[in-house]
Image: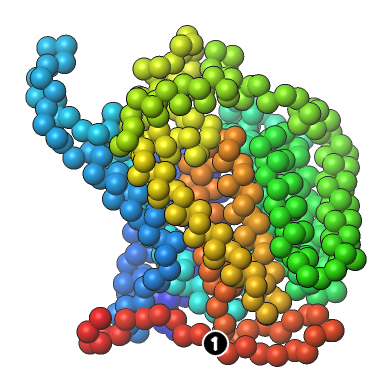
């Protein structure tokens, strides 16, 4: 293992933490730093390949839909002739995208995420690193949730006490829904390990406290989409970790889930979160924006018109605001930037191509997920179950919000996917099960796919 390999893995872990802390990486200046970090990661990847005399590349299919989506964004900005005359201006290039510059920026962003995902698939290459990544997510989730709760009490109107935002901010995010999406994913790893019995008895209480604290912070955020995502993740975990294990096992996990939820609600009430909890019981007729553009159903109905008007090629990735304004019947007090449904927006932006790539991606996620949770090693099964549930939670949340359009959310989502893939492999340093009722066995390791220099392919 080269020094470049270790630095690259450190950069992956640092990126998922820092991307969350710097306001979710949504501001142009911070996104530019993210691109620089991804360029550095690509250079470290190349340096590691040169030092080890092997260009290592993951051939996992999950990368392909994301990569092709970036390629299609480039296709959408190719000029196909010119508009004859637009308000006296001639020779304006005709492109598929309604906003070629926004689509070009989106393509760059997708390729940066591809670098991160490809590197994560390569450098999470052992059981030790899989455990370390899980520990980073769990410890960071615990500390981050604790900070978010303190901030909600001491400085609810300013992130870090310095950045004043709208009333719907929480933690380090301007939008509380993005905070909730991140916390659901961070909590999923310790939940998966607890539900599969992959945590030693002396550490179970620590894990349960961490999970309860993260759940409490999610409830305090008042995100209804996050609450639904958390419930979906927990229910899914109960189902996939109790197959063929009997009714008693199912009831124990259901009881544990209920206790965690009750504990989270109690914690939220204790720190003064009655307003946030009451918000969860309200109807979903509005989102957290000014009145004239707040109705989700209105946004979705307009998005459907955008989809119909731009089939089969789409309005252009990143060009949704431009395409939306043509059909918006409200006063336009605030420009609608997102469809508040990642699936509808993908169809609006990329048309039939987006529908195909999205469907293939979802199929690949679930296929890999069910394969990974079937492994015999209890630790890797716990990581797989948690990562799978966390991904499912975000996919459910995406029905109501645009969480996957936020860089920090996308980075952690891709990290969970890489862990899901890694947990399906066998390693020389596989960790023995903590379940004392089963014989402890070591698993043989599967070699990492590598292309040796001079091998001719």
Q: Is residue 141 left or right of residue 164?
A: right
Give x and y (percent) for residue 377. 68, 80
Instruction: Write down the quadrant of residue 77 in the picture.
Output: top left
> Which of 377/430 is in front?
377
Q: Quadrant of residue 348?
A: top left
Q: Is residue 64 left or right of residue 173?
A: left
Which residue is located at x 54 percent, y 87 percent?
445
Q: Residue at x 25, y 39 (%)?
A: 76
- Quadrant where the N terminus sits is bottom left
Relative to 192, 60 lies left or right: left
Q: Please, is residue 171 above or below residue 332 in the view? A: below
Q: Position of residue 151 (x, y in %)?
A: 71, 39
91, above or below 35, in the image: above
- Give coordinates of residue 191: x percent, y percent: 74, 60
Residue 400 position in % (x across, y down): 59, 35
Of 175 and 225, the residue lying toward us: 225
Label 1: state its secondary structure. Answer: loop
Query: Is residue 431 depicted above or below 363 in this figure?
Result: below
What residue is rendered at 81% in x and 64% in y? 206
């Amino acid at each position: 293992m080269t020094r470049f390999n270790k630095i690259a893995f450190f950069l992956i872990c640092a990126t998922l933490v820092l991307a969350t802390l710097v306001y979710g990486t949504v501001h142009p200046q911070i996104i530019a730093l993210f691109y620089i970090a991804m360029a550095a990661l690509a250079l470290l990847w190349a340096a590691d390949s040169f030092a080890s005399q092997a260009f290592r590349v993951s051939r996992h299919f999950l990368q392909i839909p994301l990569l092709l989506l970036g390629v299609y964004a480039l296709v959408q900005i190719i000029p196909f002739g010119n508009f004859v005359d637009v308000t006296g201006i001639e020779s304006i290039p005709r492109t598929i995208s309604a906003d070629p510059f926004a689509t070009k920026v989106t393509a760059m962003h997708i390729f940066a995420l591809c670098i991160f995902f490809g590197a994560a698939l390569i450098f999470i290459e052992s059981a030790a690193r899989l455990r370390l990544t899980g520990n980073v997510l769990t410890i960071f989730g615990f500390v981050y949730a604790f900070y978010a709760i303190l901030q909600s009490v001491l400085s609810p109107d300013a992130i870090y006490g310095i950045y004043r935002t709208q009333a719907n901010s929480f933690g380090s995010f301007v939008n509380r829904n993005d905070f909730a999406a991140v916390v659901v994913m961070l909590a999923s790893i310790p939940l998966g390990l607890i539900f599969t019995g992959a945590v030693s008895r002396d550490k179970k209480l620590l894990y349960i406290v961490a999970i309860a604290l993260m759940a409490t912070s999610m409830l305090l955020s008042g995100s209804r989409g996050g609450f639904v995502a958390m419930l979906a993740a927990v229910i899914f975990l109960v189902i996939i970790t109790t197959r063929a294990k009997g009714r008693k096992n199912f009831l124990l996990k259901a009881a544990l889930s209920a206790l965690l939820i009750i504990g989270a609600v109690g914690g939220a009430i204790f720190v003064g979160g009655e307003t946030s909890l009451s918000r969860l019981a309200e109807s979903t007729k509005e989102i957290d924006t000014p009145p004239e553009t707040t109705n989700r159903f209105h946004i979705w109905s307009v998005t459907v018109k955008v989809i119909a008007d731009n089939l089969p090629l789409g309005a252009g990735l990143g060009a949704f605001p431009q395409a939306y304004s043509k059909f918006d019947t409200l006063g336009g007090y605030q420009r609608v930037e997102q469809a508040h449904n990642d699936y509808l927006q993908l169809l609006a932006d990329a048309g039939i191509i987006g529908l195909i790539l999205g469907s293939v991606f979802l199929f690949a996620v679930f296929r890999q997920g069910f394969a990974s949770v079937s492994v015999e090693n209890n630790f890797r099964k716990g990581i797989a179950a948690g990562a799978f549930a966390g991904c499912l939670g975000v996919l459910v949340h995406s029905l109501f919000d645009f969480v996957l359009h936020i860089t920090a959310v996308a980075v952690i989502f891709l990290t969970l996917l890489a862990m899901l893939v890694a947990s399906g492999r066998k390693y020389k340093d596989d960790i023995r099960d903590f379940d004392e009722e089963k014989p402890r066995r070591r698993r043989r390791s599967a070699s990492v796919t590598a292309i040796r220099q001079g091998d001719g392919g």
